Image (cartoon, grey):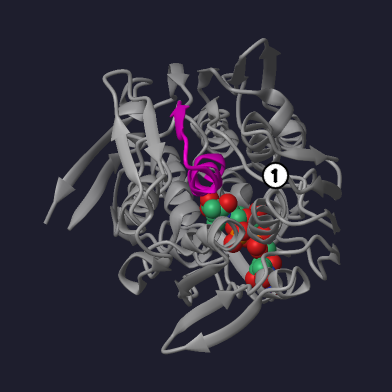
Amino acid sequence: MDYFRIRGGTPLQGNIRISGAKNAALPILAATLLTRDVSSLSNVPHLNDVTTMVELLGALGAEVSVDETTMLQVSAAALTNQRAPYELVKTMRASILVMGPLLARFGAAEVSFPGGCAIGSRPVDLHLKGFEAMGAEIDVRDGYIVATTRDGLVGCDFTFETVTVGGTENLLMAAVLADGRTILRNAAREPEITDLVCFLRGMGADIAGDGSSTLTINGVSELKASHYRVMPDRIEAGTFLVAAAATRGRITLEGANAEHLGVVVDKLRDAGVSVLVEEGRITADMRSGRPKAVDLITAPYPGFPTDMQAQFTALNVIAEGEGQITETIFENRLMQAREMSRMGADIKIDGRTVIIRGREQINGAPVMASDLRASASLVIAGLAAVGETDIDRIYHIDRGYERIEEKLQSVGANIVRKSR
Ligand code: EPZ
């Protein structure tokens, strides 16, 4: 089992190129099922979750190839079945995103119930409610969600009870081939959804309202291929900016889009980090001294992203003063706090809030990753700590960060991947 060995205390300095966004690539890969034509995607990150989605498309009968420029080509002309098997879905919850495209194109989809994961139960009830509102019949058989439509999906006016990124993406992909108009209200507004809308428009879809909480889709009879470059990963970018701040270094990100990181950049500046935003580049500089603690509450976009909560917990651990961080999106996304206590962090969990009193110094210790972003926060804590930190179960981090140890080594981090 792989683990990271980190020797902390070195200020990170240098440039890092940001990869394509995992949370844009996954729904866009699912959307390639909506046409018989061959779609092509560039800037797709090389991540375990992307590999799982490609395997899932293959299991449905799609042909996926990668050319020498790492351009991904997907042909869904000859799908052989509409069943997403448990062994794939259990490793990646986002597998549920094939349900909308399969229903839209074939009127049938069988997807194993996605397991909850470390950060909470993560139901899909709102996805299913939306499909039913569009005329689908939903059954649950042997752990599989079986969705069918006798006469095809019909446009509807649907309001999400809570903002859901995946639910918005799934219903968007179902609506583009539905009969008539669909209005999705209280829809998620994440940049990854706007990326999916751009890809779907490239296929010939008729969608308005992206970036707002109301999406209007006029169904069309068929869609054609789309050739698209996936947006840069804003969470990867935010993670490296926090790593620069926590190690009192200076990192410039190439290929990052600061527009997607508005409130994260504001929070870094509140912490005393000098952040320079240029066209396609962001520089975080904390060589001036120790960051200050910040308070934050996670919220749907454009609020503070839940996927950056653990990283800011790590920053507060070594910051000056007391910071409170509240997680409102997932019910169990504070597990990194316990691991940081092992490193000497003064951190208390009170319900969905962590209260952190910053320490001038924390010490390396053996710790264990519990989920993707918790792993990233432990890497940041290890880089800021004095001494050696071993992080176990780093398969979590490989799901969402492309070659993270190489990127960190390139800016001076003492981090190596080892096996035991
Ligand atoms: C997406 O997950 C992201 N994953 C997550 O990133 C991200 O944390 C999350 O959105 C919130 O921004 C991908 O895009 C692949 P939700 P998703 O549906 O779609 C509840 C990462 O680290 N809910 O917006 O699964 C749900 O339980 C990952 O990259 C329902 O109750 O999140 C949660 O409390 C982690 N019923 C809240 O909504 C539903 O039918 C938000 O979930 C659907 C969701």
Nearer to me, 326 or 93? 93
Residue 420 is a magenta residue: no
Residue at the spot of label 1 = 293
Looking at the image, can residue 210 be seen?
no
Q: In which quadrant is the N terminus drawn? A: bottom left
Ligand 1's quadrant: bottom right
> Measured from the top left, where is residue 357 in percent x and y?
64, 55
Relative to 300, is 406 on the left or the right? Answer: left
SS class, disc 1: loop
Question: How many neighbours does mark 1 have within 10 angstroms: few (below 14), some (14-19), or many (20 or more)?
Answer: many
Relative to 371, is 417 on the left or the right? Answer: left
> Measured from the top left, where is residue 406 in percent x and y?
30, 28
Residue 25 is a magenta residue: yes
Mark 1 residue type: Ala
Q: In which quadrant is the C terminus drawn? A: bottom left
At 70% from the left edge and 44% from the top edge, which residue is drawn? 293
At 81% from the left edge and 46% from the top edge, which residue is drawn? 218
Magenta-highlighted stretch: main secondary structure? helix
At 34% from the left edge and 53% from the top edge, which residue is drawn? 52
Chain part drawn in magenta: 23-42
